[in-house]
Image (cartoon, rainbow, N blue to C red):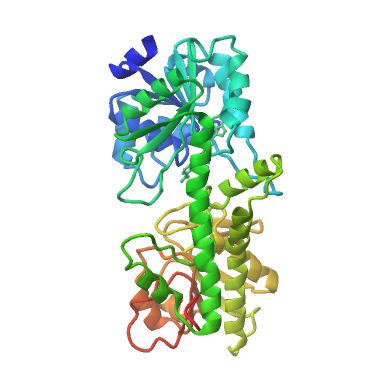
Amino acid sequence: MGLLRKIESRDFSVAIIGLGYVGLPLAIEFTKAGVKAYGIDVDKKKVQQLQRGENYIQDLSDNVVREAVEKKLLIAETDPSVITQADVIYICVPTPFTPNKEPDISFILNASEATAEHLRSEQCVVLKSTTFPTTTEEYVLPILEKSGLKIGEEYFLAFSPERIDPGNKVWHTGNTPIVVGGVTPECTKVAAAANRVIIEHVHEVSSPNVAEMEKLLENIFRSVNIALVNELAQLCDRMGINIWDVVEAAATKPFGYMPFWPGPGIGGHCILIDPYYLSWHARSDDFVTNFVTLAAEVNESMPYYVRQMVLREIAYLPVTLKEAQVLILGVAFKRDVDDLRHSPALKVMELLTEDGAENINYIDPHVPQLELNGVTMRSLAYSEERIAEADIVLITTDHTSFDYREIARHAKLIVDTRNATKDAEGDRSNIRLLGGGS
Ligand SMILES: NC(=O)c1ccc[n+]([C@@H]2O[C@H](COP(=O)([O-])OP(=O)(O)OC[C@H]3O[C@@H](n4cnc5c(N)ncnc54)[C@H](O)[C@@H]3O)[C@@H](O)[C@H]2O)c1
């Protein structure tokens, strides 16, 4: 097999379709191994930035991106015809849901069409976007078959889900084990070989369906466990028990348990969306995924719970909700990232605005500006005075750059949804902790 030999001798190139949180780090990992990467994106702004050697992904080093462009190892394009020049093509496009929370795989279909148009023999296509089982074989394969080439002999197709965890300082694309399942055993072999050039541990499975389902299991596992502690946090508030102490205590058990923490809800492009991909598909099998649905219900109720916490606290203040200065700390969907997609902080801000709050501001060093209900808001600069002025400080994301002891010292009142203020000393009477038992 010529392609396998080319990959094993590292004499090959890749094309990455979709240069976002997944695609650009993947492209850079290949360039670090000396493999030329053609990056393709429909977003002209991203492509132009890369062509100038500018990085836009927080976890990547600006120097590494610039060097890859200068050495012509990373070539960014909007024109998908460069696909013909690559040996292995990775599809890393978004998989959002519709307003009715049904899968939208149109980005995968468009990228597959573009690939089919430029497909030649001795190429391997690897789908990385998270999606429901059967996508690779029942949606992508028929599109690629239009090329007239023979799968498993002339070209290869596999699913290999992404596990990148933006903001994670330990685990990144290069050192996180990865799963791969090809349409035929030859497809698995070729795609696994390409992955092994940049990733040490590659786990081969029998089919794309197994790999697609495996990825959903990972994300549903997180969603269900987070929902469990979110439900218990609400119960603990009623019972006067601190859930954070409970989870910390349970985490001392060295086997059969791993800690998950409560919070204001889940966000991002994965844990919130992916479970719906499975529950949607299950309906066509006359099956109801109860765990998935219940977890989504609990997690998606959390911003509403936080809204109630804020409203209750404001009711005790000598200001109305309309007048109250509400200062949100951290709007990204999780700690130390700049990703706002489906952030629970935005949902809480939206709900409080609907309730009549007119003075909501936010501070987030990772998110200089955002759109809320069509209005552009800019992050305020952090200062002790700003904290002290606010009637209520709502901690929605616990970025490590904030000094929570200082915040606790200066704030009149804090609603803390992340236990960020756990180390605040002295009088903590100004702190209301989600799941804190009060
Ligand atoms: N972000 C994560 O942490 C993460 C982790 C694991 C898996 N995933 C999955 O990986 C996939 C990609 O996620 P992401 O966060 O990188 O998305 P993203 O939105 O950051 O990037 C996707 C890119 O694809 C581009 N694109 C869309 N259609 C295209 C087309 N037809 N041709 C070329 N480019 C196109 C978009 O312009 C965008 O730049 C999703 O399925 C997601 O669920 C994401």
In the rendered image, the quadrant that contains the N terminus is: top left
In this rendering, the answer to whether 208 lies above or below 85 is below
Q: Is residue 45 among the parts visible in the rendering? A: no
In this rendering, the answer to whether 261 lies above or below 239 is above
Q: Residue at x 64, y 73 (%)?
A: 358
| Observer-nearest of 391 and 438 | 438
Q: Residue at x 32, y 31 (%)?
A: 198
Left or right, residue 310 beside residue 410 = right
Question: In which quarter of the view is residue 196 placed?
Answer: top left
The x, y position of residue 337, in whole percent, is: 42, 54
Question: In which quarter of the view is residue 75 placed?
Answer: top left
Left or right, residue 428 beside residue 281 = left
The x, y position of residue 369, in whole percent, is: 52, 56
In this rendering, the answer to whether 219 lies above or below 196 is below
Q: Residue at x 47, y 34 (%)?
A: 19
Question: In which quarter of the view is residue 110 placed?
Answer: top right
The x, y position of residue 84, in whole percent, is: 48, 14
Q: Is residue 230 among the parts visible in the rendering? A: yes
